[in-house]
Image (cartoon, rainbow, N blue to C red):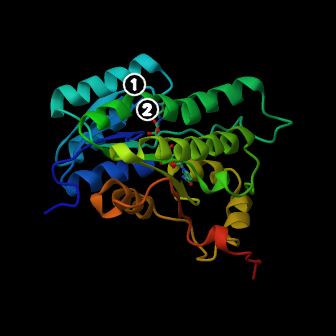
Amino acid sequence: MGRLDGKVAVITGAAGGIGREAALLFSAEGAQVCVADVGREAGEKTAAECREAFYQAADVSNPESVQALYAETVRRYGGMDILYNNAGIMPPDDDSILATEPDAWDRVQAINAKGVFLCCKYGIPYLLKRGGGSVINVASFVAILGAATSQIAYTASKGAVLSMSRELAVQFARQGVRVNALCPGPVETPLLMRLFESDPAAYERRRVHLPMGRLAKAREIANAALFLASDESSYVNGATFLVDGGLTAAYVTPE
Ligand SMILES: NC(=O)c1ccc[n+]([C@@H]2O[C@H](COP(=O)([O-])OP(=O)(O)OC[C@H]3O[C@@H](n4cnc5c(N)ncnc54)[C@H](O)[C@@H]3O)[C@@H](O)[C@H]2O)c1
């Protein structure tokens, strides 16, 4: 018996990083998975490694693309139960407010905030048709704490995801749709590791403030998403679901 037997999950940004890990885990737990991503090669590879999945090219910032993504998932699997809205970007030109240009701001909001809006707007009606479901919107610990390294557009986009998720959680609670904001702490993924390659001191600056003294593994975030996706979390709704190793709980000083 898998924890997601009989469920259909759409995971955006599932070609790499945390989303890929979740696609492998959700499918191993019995779900049929749509691996949605702009990256075809990596997306097809992820889908091929899953027990039952397909890759769908999708840009979450584009309304037609999101609608096509769901239409194809429903055509193949007959409906949807889980929306894991995970796609997100953290581009290098998103910096301090003094250095970030308006086009970088727009690009980040288009994917991180509007992308989640579109995935919920077009996806929730399908969950309602099934009598309920679980929506996992990916925010971040930076929706709650200021970031050690300035990234103003990203931080603001994650704040938008967090507040949007609360409102949706209230709106659809009596119709069986749960909406939670998954807020990871720093994770060892290409997104973050790219940032640290050029600046090892930035890695050290962050690590010393982590109570556990290490970043999260992608699998540790995917495991939390699995809980939120499954019926085990049936009374978890509207949560700011922090998976941060205690980062937001402590004021840790360097040794
Ligand atoms: N890595 C961290 O430390 C960390 C911390 C907190 C939150 N998060 C969030 O977790 C999520 C996953 O992050 P990750 O570290 O796995 O990132 P990642 O860069 O490894 O993976 C992100 C995936 O999203 C895809 N993507 C980018 N733009 C897209 C678009 N327009 N449409 C569809 N797919 C698109 C990419 O191709 C990639 O496969 C993001 O929302 C990120 O903001 C990450």
Residue type highlighted by circle 2? Cys
Front residue of this view, candidates 82 and 53: 82
Residue 246: image location, x then y, percent:
60, 72
- Image quadrant in which the C terminus is located: bottom right
Front residue of this view, candidates 226 and 135: 135
Q: Residue drawn 58% across and 59% down?
A: 186
Find disc 2 in the rendering and name its residue: 119
Q: Which quadrant would residue 148 be assigned to in this image?
A: bottom right
Q: Residue furthest front?
A: 174
**Mark 1 Cα shell of 10 Å, populated few (<14), some (14-19), many (≥20):** many
Residue 4: image location, x then y, percent:
22, 55
Disc 2 CB within 8 Å of nearest ligand 1 atom: no
> So how many labels did they put on this image?
2
- Image quadrant in which the N terminus is located: bottom left
Q: In the visual, does 251 lie left or right of 166?
A: right
Q: Residue furthest bottom?
A: 255
Q: Residue furthest right?
A: 98
Residue 138: image location, x then y, percent:
50, 47
Q: Is residue 43 above or below residue 228?
A: above
Front residue of this view, candidates 35 and 232: 232
Find disc 1 in the rendering and name its residue: 66
**Mark 2 Cα shell of 10 Å, populated few (<14), some (14-19), many (≥20):** many
Q: In the visual, does 47 lie left or right of 19?
A: left
> Circles 1 and 2: CB distance less than 8 Å?
yes
Q: In the visual, does 232 lie left or right of 48?
A: right
* Distance Cα–Cα, label 1 vs label 2: 6 Å
Residue 34: image location, x then y, percent:
28, 37
Residue type highlighted by circle 1? Val
